[in-house]
Image (spheres, rainbow, N blue to C red):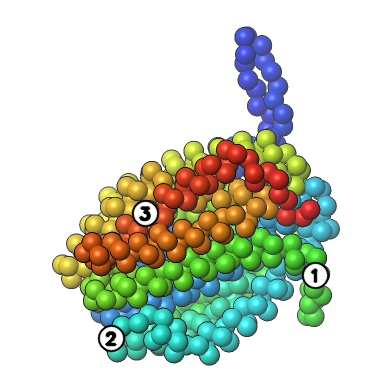
Amino acid sequence: MIGYVEENNRECGLCILEKRRFFSNRALFNLFLPIIIEQFLEYLVGLADSIMAASVGEAAVSGVSLVDFVMALLISLFAALSTGGAVVAGQYLGRRQQEKARNTANQLVWFAGLSAVVIMVLVYGLKPVILHGVFGAITPEVYDYADRYLMITAASIPFLALYNAGAAIFRTMGNARLPMMIMLAMNIAHAAGNAVLIYGFHFGVEGVAIPTLIARIAAAIIVLFLVMDKKQALYLERKWKPQFDSKIIHQILGIGIPYGLENGLFYLGRIVVLSLVSLFGTSAIAANAVGGTLVMFEALPGLAIGFGLTVVVARCIGAKDYEQARYYTRKVLKIVYTAQIIMCALVLLLLPSILAIYGLSAESAALTYKLVWAHAIVEILIWPLAYTLPVTFRAAGDARFPMVIGTVSMIFCRILLSYVFALHFGMGMFGTWVAMFFDWGVKALIFCARYIKGSWTKYQAIG
């Protein structure tokens, strides 16, 4: 629960009582740690999926990873929409307008669910374009695995959206533990299902896809059932017919659309880069896939804590207390740096053992080792400034600026420089990762300047 704490400073032997803080250290810990664990469990299942797919062959790993990039794009869109709902509801709670905050939660769930159904239909309709047109030069075997995997997992799209919306509502109330427990239960069932279908019944990629679908359906049902409890500050009303509030949806989309476009273009940029990676063969695709899975663990603390920081800053901005918004941003940045140093060290320590489990070819394993080490070194130095600071901007209502900077940097750094480094300088697939590091650096410099200037304090999501 959200706590209040009084902090004392001693100056010249005198005890000066500072202003009350919205979130105590304990409240921050109780908010951040469950989100980190929840995200860790989600990534751990992704790692288990790719390891189990590796037992089918490198082509299966490549096919699953290509589809997972598409699914990650969709998940990022739902996360952006949920972030918009969390910001608006959080700012209303900061102003002590609980009825409007509750209405925001209801609007978020209905809009996210219906939008996701439309997206699912589009994914099935555009399947040939996604698999053949976007990814480019992939072998028939990789295409076949990707096609079979997508046909099953695409049915989970609406449930992904509903789970994200429900989890965001609980985090906005300061209850991050409940989504963590749901994710824990579902991931245990997911991993067990994978093991039974792949190793017991030899289902191939279907053995990865079917448990994924079932787990996502179950997680959505559970979180929606629990969010209907009227004893909570924010709860979902039991209505079968949606009643949309155009003003609140506009407020949610004011954050969700820019953030969603930013995330969407980011992942589309990665897909474009994947078409470049595919030119270097199946070994490069497999190394890129496995490396991409492992480095997500390195960035995990920062990404997870970002969800919590959204709740914290939105509450401060709703109360029009920008000093506390700055205070928590600085504090959380220190937490992110510390957490990511620990996580990167842990990943690098376990890296040889993890690569041995994958059973990759010598070429793929060597390239994966290089990617993960490079990512860890650069991330510790730059990543929080490029990705934690814009969380504060969005939570304040300043969502368009990060979108513009993220989009421009993605085009000119991540995409353009990928071709320059990979082809012109002969760096191969590793050059696409170097371009990503340049992208981080550019964003970090620009976001630091905006934070110091304070332009983001002129915004509010709810007017």
x and y percentages locating residue 299 in the rendered image: 42, 54
- The residue singled out by tag 2 in the image is 139
Where residue 261 appears, x then y in whole percent?
57, 67
Give the Cα separation between the discs numbered 2 and 1.
47 Å
Amino acid type at circle 1 is Ser
Q: Position of residue 168 (x, y in %)?
A: 64, 60
Say if 58 sits above or below 367 in the image.
below
**Secondary-structure class at tag 1:** helix
Q: Are marks 3 and 1 in contact (CB under 8 Å)?
A: no
Residue type at mark 2 is: Thr
The kind of secondary structure element at disc 3 is helix
User: Separation of disc 3 and disc 2 at Cα?
Assistant: 29 Å
Q: CA distance from mark 3 to mark 1?
A: 40 Å
Can residue 245 be seen from the camera position used here? Answer: yes
Q: Mark 1 highlights which residue? A: 246
Q: In the rendered structure, which amino acid carries the disc numbered 3?
A: Phe
Local SS, label 2? loop
**Residue placed most toward the observer, 266 or 341:** 266
Q: Earlier in the sequence, mark 2 or mark 1?
A: 2
Residue at the disc numbered 3: 437
Residue 389 vertical position relative to residue 229 in the rendered view, above or below:
above
The answer to whether 171 is drawn above or below residue 117 in the figure is above
Question: Residue 155 or 256: which is nearer the viewer?
Answer: 256
